[in-house]
Image: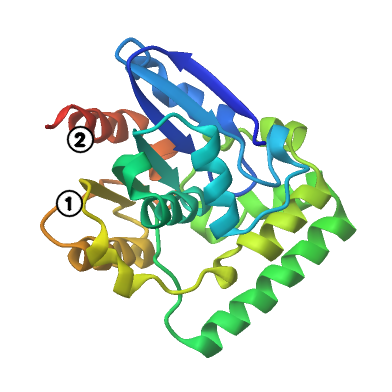
Amino acid sequence: MLNVIERGDGNPVVLVHGFTQSASAWWPLVEPLESTHRIVALDAPGHGGSSGVEAGLADGSDLMVATSPAPAAWVGYSMGSRFALHAALRHPSAVERLVLVSATAGIDDAGERTARRSSDAALAERVETDGVETFLQFWVSQPMFSTLPPEAARLEERIASSNASGLASSLRLAGAGSQAPAWELLPSLAMPVLVVAGALDEKYRALGRRIADSIGSNAEMRVIPGAGHACHLERPDEFLEVLAAFLKRR
């Protein structure tokens, strides 16, 4: 089973973090929600207290649903959004509403997907060779995180909660290259969906718009001004305002 941390009381909200993070990455954001929501933060396979769990996006999302209250609102960031999307597609009755942050529904082109799988495999070898600390220093220094303040990156916390074999397993089994394109399945999502991206993250802003348009009238797209890929960490107040309004909406 997956490691779970819970806080608060009320309607359940399931949170799924990004690659190299853990459930605790959400805590600076969720305090305003604890008085009205039961916050259920999962350690994804290969991360934190779930480091020994090896699972891909499909079986990993099954584990997450089995571990979580249902129905619930689901919020996923980056890698976590891929898990949350799989949960909604595979177990729609468990996902009452869905929030996808910096998300994609997969790489369309088969050649690009193969190249990404190779890139993910190379990263897996790198973390096994270099070790967690060196790899994570490299990871957060990438251009996609250039607008993420060091204090929001919480590097020391990531290092303490990670091990090389878990991260390598996550890259091989649940990396972006492993995701089968799900664009044609998006119109089947009947629950309310909120898609969020940072204004400075051109790639995922475009992908987010495509996701929302593909789902249809029950989806909305919100862009966080002045934020990049980790928009919820870079502009937490703005993100929480958008999230809280969506969770309250009937």
Could you say where residue 60 lies in the image, as x and y percent from the top left?
A: 59, 51
Residue plotted at (22% across, 65% down): 187
Residue 178: give x, y in percent of width and height.
Answer: 59, 70
Q: Residues within 10 Å of mark 2 (few under 14, many from 20)?
A: some
Q: Nearer the viewer, residue 170 or 116?
A: 170
Badge 1, how many Cα within 10 Å: few under 14, some, many 20+?
some
Image check: 135 left or right of 84?
right
Considering every residue shown, the one lying at the far bottom of the view is 111
Q: Nearer the viewer, residue 236 or 93?
A: 93
Indicate the amino acid at tag 1.
Glu
Per the image, label 2 sits on a secondary structure element best described as helix
Q: Position of residue 205 (x, y in %)?
A: 30, 61
Q: Residue under circle 1?
A: 220
From this view, report whether residue 154 is shown above or below residue 105: above
Q: Nearer the viewer, residue 217 or 160?
A: 217
Q: Secondary structure at mark 1?
A: strand
Q: Please give the name of the residue rendered at 44% of the width and 50% of the height, measured from the top-left corner.
A: 87
What is the three-letter code of the residue carrying label 2? Phe
